[in-house]
Image: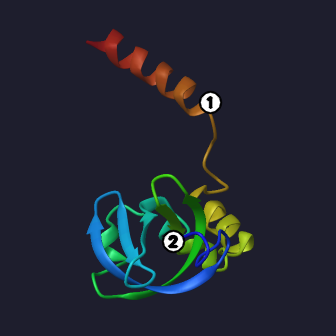
Amino acid sequence: MAEKFETGQVLTGKVTGIQPYGAFVALDEQVQGLVHISEVTHGFVKDINEHLSVGDEVKVKILDINEQSGKYSLSIRATEEAPAKQQQASVQKQAVSEDAPAGFNTLKDKLQDWIKQTEGK
């Protein structure tokens, strides 16, 4: 079994089954492996069905082969280029507005308003 496939090898396989935790991919007629949900793509995957369907042909990299159990750990994201860090940084900058006060200062200011509100009642 290990003679045919090796760790680090990149192959094309066919999705044969999908579970909430990952997808089973057939490498040939006798061998199939699991692509864990965290190895489907770069970034967070909430629902694997949004990314894969049974019958899809996918490019996978063999991460690990367990000789005793015959289990293959596969990755789709290892065959894809990671998103550029520049894009990630720009998204983070957009999420935090420059004119918005940061940290506990806003809470400190609001606390004074809340105290005034409760004293007025």
**How far separated are the C-alphas under marks 2 and 1?**
38 Å
Give the residue at mark 2. 41
Q: What residue type is labelled 1?
A: Asn
Give the residue at mark 1. 105
Residue 44 visible at all: no
Image coordinates for residue 45, horizontal then vertical, percent: 41, 63
**Which one is nearer the viewer's eye here, 63 or 38?**
63
SS category of the residue bearing label 1: helix
**Which one is nearer the viewer's eye here, 68 or 36?**
68
SS category of the residue bearing label 2: loop
Image coordinates for residue 105, horizontal then vertical, percent: 62, 30
Direction from residue 117 to residue 91 in the image, left or right: right
Image coordinates for residue 89, horizontal then vertical, percent: 70, 65
Image coordinates for residue 69, horizontal then vertical, percent: 45, 54
Q: In which quarter of the image is residue 82?
A: bottom right
Answer with mark 2 or mark 1, whichever residue precedes in sequence: 2
